[in-house]
Image (spheres, rainbow, N blue to C red):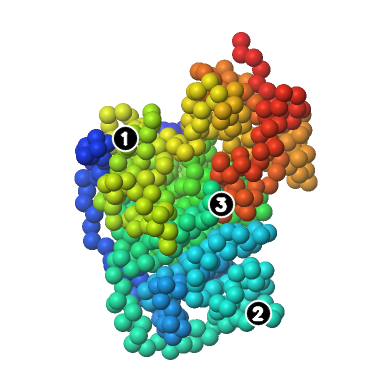
Amino acid sequence: MQTDPKHAPFRDVPFPETDIREYLAADGALLLRAAMSLGAYPERMTEGLLHWAAAAPDRVFMAQRDATGGWRKYTYGQTLEAVKSIAQALLNRGLTPETPVAILSENSIEHGLLAFAALHAGIPHAPVSPAYSLRSTDFVKLRQCIELLTPGLIFVVDGKKYESALRAVAGKTEILVVANFPENLPATPFENLLKTVPGPAVEQAYHNIRPDTIAKILFTSGSTGPPKGVINTHGNICANWQQIRQTIPFLADDLLLLDWLPWSHTFGGNHNFGLCSWLGGSFYIDEGNPTPAGIAATVANLREIAPTIYFNVPRGFEELIPRLKADQALRTMFFSRLKLLFYAGASISQPVWDALEALSVEATGQRVVISAGLGCTESSPAALLCAQKGGFAGLLGTPVPGLELKLAAAGDKLEARFRGPNITPGYWRQPELTARAFDADGFYCTGDALRFAAPGNPNAGLLFDGRITEDFKISTGTWVHVGALRAQLIAAGAGLIQDVVLAGESRPFVGAIVFPDIHQLRKITGLDTAADITTLTTHPAARAALQQVLNDFAQRSTGSSSLVQRAVFADFTLSIDAGEITDKGSINQGAVLASRAATVERIYAEREDDGVVVVLERE
């Protein structure tokens, strides 16, 4: 008799007791903070590297596939040796906090070595989204980042691959390349830095680092304007590592990660890679990604590497689930050591959550704990974490130790505002943005709305209640709460809808641009992998499926603000240049509406459009 996943026991992993205290701020807003005080944490981000290089020098720190398909590995001892050499080379070049290191390339061992060397020498580094170099056609966002940074060194792994981007932005700045040097463009071999003999200047630079020393400059997507350079200090990130460790203490137990998330993003870089270095874990670089093409590399890696914790964005789990269902050996390997599944970047749907629990029970007889949180680049990143068994999709948890959460009234919603040692001091060379980002009490204003999972009980956690800036009014004056409506429509799609952009500001009704799940469309239409997105979305069966979703959704709506009257499938590719999508796969609502005005007009056109699905009148 098969075990009902909802009745199966959880894997035995400990969480501390949740004890959240409520206070009133001077302005009358509600303040929440954990009763648990924040423990001591390092002043410098490479203290963990020094510790583990002495305590476990032969332990694998980083590993990456080589040209033969094997794993090229760097131990903690080897990493520290290389970091000291590179740090000396950076100091020899006279790099300072005003001339950071710009890293344009994807995750790699060399990227990691250079990043830690900069950290060890007290020189800021800025890992810039590779999409700005590889998926852009005009390099506008890349230019904006480089002009703001004024870097003293620009690094890429593959000079040929990044040649066009380098020609667009490098100017006279020294270029550092690992392999495949660009033609007629001077570049320094990375191996030259590895040959540098470290001297006493490296140790002195390390000891000069203080908690307020700038560690990283991380660029936000900049979808509504030029990218913003968020400053993360050594103290910000180290404090956040301690906050995470106290909330999820078993992270420190035999930590092994296989991870693709880009280090140019705070989740991949600060949370996963950085935390791993401090806790003495082993980090296997996954060169896959959550796309139909990239998932094959991830699956191949998961056949060999059994992570103890697995981090991903919702789309990554969606791509992985059908492979786990179809392959018992993969499923057994994946869940064999797994203690926690953690998603971030967007909210996961309940069907995806349920599928992961069912697969865990099928593989082990136990439910793996699934968790999430709320954070941002400005909070380094974790601000809220869900530290409990038996949660559900969308539960964000409670404030981490040492962080104050202010819930400030914003219309009929509550905006989340953060204050604590992990919060950024501001934006790189953008004082006007810094001034606008904080309220009078020094809280960072996130623009995210939250609500209590159980009113009157803060220990039950909080739920995401949308982005305040995304909400709009239709022409009747009725507010549409985009975050909640989007989540409800995705759930109603039962696998058909991957994401949604909602339209309707100053319009008579709410419309939707629907981004379908390609796997589901192929099942519905019976078309194979040769069919492109246009063929799939124009198929009568696909249109009928969307019609049914809209009709069923309309039966449950309670008024114009919760009724999606018209929808159209997105049959286009999202643009990184227009800011429509980030390198972690999340969609920006405002950017899509601005750049896809013609698609929006199709939804609201008076003349009937065969591609637009109109909800049938409710009975």
Question: Disc 3 versus disc 2: distance between alpha carbons?
Answer: 29 Å
Residue beneath disc 2 = 185
Which residue: 53% across, 85% down?
A: 192
Return the x and y of residue 309 as percentages of the image width and height: 43, 54
Of residues 37 and 138, the one nearer the viewer is 138
Of residues 453 and 284, the one nearer the viewer is 453
Residue beneath disc 1 = 460
- Number of the front mark, 1 or 3: 3
Residue extending farthest front? 432
Which residue: 60% across, 81% down?
A: 187
Residue beneath disc 3 = 582
Task: Specify few, some or many for label 2: CA neighbours under 10 Å numbering under 14, 14-19, or 20 or more.
Answer: few
Task: Specify few, some or many for label 1: CA neighbours under 10 Å numbering under 14, 14-19, or 20 or more.
Answer: many
Return the x and y of residue 90 as percentages of the image width and height: 45, 80
Sequence-earlier tag: 3 or 2: 2
Q: Can residue 16 be seen in this view?
A: no
Residue extending farthest top? 619
Question: Disc 1 versus disc 3: distance between alpha carbons?
Answer: 31 Å
Instruction: From this view, report whether residue 508 is shown above or below residue 426.
Output: above
Instruction: From this view, report whether residue 552 is shown above or below residue 180.
Output: above
Which residue: 36% across, 52% down?
A: 435
- Number of the front mark, 3 or 2: 2
Q: Is mark 1 on a helix, strand or loop?
A: helix
